[in-house]
Image: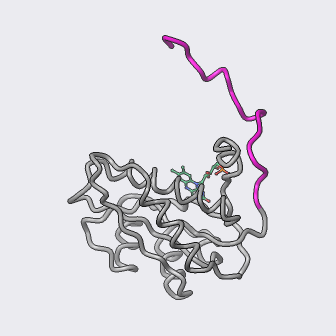
Amino acid sequence: MILDAISHRRACRSFKAESVPPALIEELIKAAQFAPTARNRRPLEFIIVTDQKTKQAIHDALVPQDSVVQAPVIIVPMADTKVASKPREDLALATENIWLQATHLQLGCVWKHVHDGEEQQKLRAALGIPENFLVINVLPIGYPTEMPTPYTDAEFDSKKIHREKW
Ligand SMILES: Cc1cc2nc3c(=O)[nH]c(=O)nc-3n(C[C@H](O)[C@H](O)[C@H](O)COP(=O)(O)O)c2cc1C
């Protein structure tokens, strides 16, 4: 069952205009907050963006990608580096949980990367994120207009498995 859910999680970059009910967005945040965090520090906070002007500001801060302005909602996960032990790892695991729960809810999602340095600073400025919060991605989410097909055994690569030693 879980492998089936995992196989259906794909990157969605094209969304319908239909908005996502707040109760479903709350489920996505719940999924993120149930992810493991290093030393159980629980350093993550989230901005939920539905305002079109704010989405445009996010779009303009990053390498352009249409899905950022097209998606009805964007979740911005942030890790408090004053609290976190392994902020990037915590963010990545929370992202995967959001992505999987979105898949379960028939929602599309994509990891839109936020590069360290200038991009991250521009995003912080656009959203008023304090300096001590790390952002590695933003997550455009919505009902998909198209989705890649689920993974199958054709993508399973047994040659990459090493037994006992390389
Ligand atoms: C670290 C990381 C960065 C990514 N950055 C982007 C991105 O900026 N824009 C985008 O559309 N997809 C991005 N993706 C999504 C990947 O392109 C996508 O997951 C990959 O092509 C595999 O496709 P799948 O998600 O459908 O399995 C990123 C994924 C990861 C893990």
The residue located at (26%, 49%) in the rendering is 85
Vertical placement of residue 98 versus 157, above or below = below
Residue placed furthest toward the left? 82
The residue located at (49%, 57%) in the rendering is 95
Vertical placement of residue 88 versus 70, above or below = above
Residue 64 percent location from the top left of the image: 57, 70
The residue located at (37%, 51%) in the rendering is 88
Residue sitting nearer the eye, 20 or 92: 20
Residue sitting nearer the eye, 40 or 114: 40
Residue 33 percent location from the top left of the image: 42, 60
Q: Quadrant of residue 107?
A: bottom right
- Indicate left or right for 5 with 59 as reference: right
Residue 25 percent location from the top left of the image: 54, 73
Q: Which residues are magenta?
A: 147-166
- Is residue 105 on the magenta stretch? no
Most common SS among magenta residues? loop
- Indicate left or right for 129 with 146 as reference: left
Residue sitting nearer the eye, 57 or 130: 130
Q: Quadrant of residue 79?
A: bottom left
Q: Quadrant of residue 148?
A: bottom right
- Is residue 161 on the magenta stretch? yes
The N terminus sits in image quarter: top right
Q: What is the tally of numbered marks visible in this picture?
A: 0
Residue 40 percent location from the top left of the image: 29, 50
The residue located at (53%, 80%) in the rendering is 55
